Amino acid sequence: MSNYFELFGLPESFEIDLAALSSTYQQLQRVTHPDKFAGQSEQQQRIALQKNAQVSDGYQALKSPVRRAEHLLSLRGIELAGETQTMQDMDFLMQQMHWREMLADINESNDPEQVIDDLNDEVEQQLRMLTKSLSESLQV
């Protein structure tokens, strides 16, 4: 398995410098771009294509908080059960039902924009809380 943190010269941490990630990605893309190997052997072109794909995969994984957390866990030998795990989490299901009810109530509301703002605030607050909890849980 590739360690994308090593590939991008970043510490294995949930909290990363996204600007440094982006900058390194652009540099690696320039170095590994298949067009640079057009005059090389077929094997060298294939290797460049594989390296370029690995750089793209790594960038996509590290720029996404969820995929970054999954990558960190996989580096530690922990494979997630995926979405099947969430279906057993009653708090998660109750939260989803609450938000669906808020969405359903928008059309009947006297102030639908306020309902949307309230829902947005709740989702953003939940996202901040979960991201903070995830970051703390992944501290090495």
Image (cartoon, grey):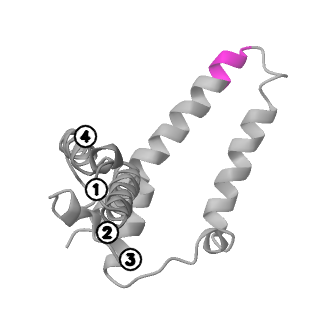
**What residue does disc 2 label?**
137
**What residue does disc 1 label?**
40
Q: Are marks 4 and 2 in contact (CB under 8 Å)?
A: no
Distance, label 1 to label 3, CA atoms, is 35 Å
Q: Mark 2 packing: few (<14 Cα in 10 Å), some, or many (20+)?
A: few
Distance, label 4 to label 1, CA atoms, is 22 Å
Q: Position of residue 9 (x, y in %)?
A: 14, 58
- Say which label, 2 or 1, has the lower sequence index: 1
Q: For the residue labelled by badge 4, is the local secondary structure a helix, a strand or a loop?
A: helix
| Residue at point 33%, 65% (across, down) | 47
- Say which label, 4 or 2, has the lower sequence index: 4
Q: Could you tell me the amino acid type at mark 2?
A: Ser
Q: Which mark is residue 74?
A: 3
Front residue of 56/84: it is 56
Quarter of the rendering containing residue 86? bottom right
Q: For the residue labelled by badge 3, is the local secondary structure a helix, a strand or a loop?
A: helix
Q: Residue furthest bottom?
A: 77
Residue 38 among magenta residues: no
- Say which label, 4 or 1, has the lower sequence index: 4
Quarter of the rendering containing residue 20? top left
In this rendering, the count of numbered labels is 4
Q: Could you tell me the amino acid type at mark 3?
A: Ser
Residue 114 among magenta residues: yes
Left or right of 85, for residue 24: left
**Quadrant of the image containing the C terminus:** bottom left
Mark closer to the observer (4, 1): 1
Q: Could you tell me the amino acid type at mark 4?
A: Gln
